[in-house]
Amino acid sequence: GVGHVRCLRVTAGYFRSQISSRLLPTLRAYSPDLILLSMGFDGADGDVGNQNIWLDGCPCGLDLSPEDYKWATEEISAVADVVCNGRVVSVLEGGYGSRGFRKVGDQSVMTLDRGTLVDASASHVRGLIGSDSFYRAPLRSARSGRLLAGPAGP
């Protein structure tokens, strides 16, 4: 009715089922020349953007795991391989981290732990370039040259 908010509990399983049953068939049917993928990491379990706020007695939030992000990226990339020669542009957005606390003097100060964001985005990158190649070739920062992931190697 008017003035009532209805909350639909969207789980990681529902997220995956919607990608499998709606998004992937639509992409295959449309057959784009390029797929633009905007991956919002604020749906990650523990992220402050995914607070599990209870609305009308119903928890909200996707609570996606790093594996969910990797799976979604791999599924979309597999369709891209067929319909557009693997052309995917990925924009990483959303995601802030999880709340934490640390002691500063005699006070507790709220902090933002970026580990949740790092895990989700790293899994997305693994899905884009393939899990096996991710660990064979080092991933370095374009700006600093600092090793971000993978073996140091020669």
Image (cartoon, grey):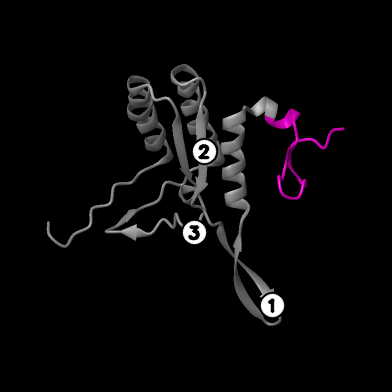
Q: Is residue 72 above or below residue 60?
A: above
Disc 1 packing (10 Å; few <14; some 14–19; many ≥20)? few
Q: Is residue 63 above or below residue 153?
A: below
As rendered, which of 153 and 44 lies closer to the eye? 153
As rendered, which of 142 and 94 lies closer to the eye? 142
User: On the image, numbered disc 3 is attached to which residue?
Assistant: 48
Q: Any mark on residue 67, and which?
A: none
Tell which residue pokes out farthest to the bottom in this image: 106
Q: Residue 74 location in percent, x, y?
A: 52, 28
- Location of residue 128 (image quadrant): top right
Q: Locate the C terminus by quadrant.
A: top right
Report the mark closest to the observer, 3 or 2.
Answer: 2
Disc 2 packing (10 Å; few <14; some 14–19; many ≥20)? some
**Secondary element at tag 1:** strand
**Secondary element at tag 3:** loop
Q: Earlier in the sequence, mark 1 or mark 2?
A: 2
Answer with left or right where residue 140 lies relative to residue 28: right
**Secondary element at tag 2:** strand
Does the residue at mark 1 contact the one at mark 3 (Cβ under 8 Å)? no
Tell which residue pokes out farthest to the top in this image: 82
Residue at the image point whose x is 69% and y is 77% from the top: 104
Q: Locate the N terminus by quadrant.
A: bottom left
Answer with left or right where residue 40 lies relative to residue 6: right
Q: Any mark on residue 104, and which?
A: 1
User: On the image, numbered disc 2 is attached to which residue?
Assistant: 90
Could you tell me the amino acid type at mark 3? Answer: Val
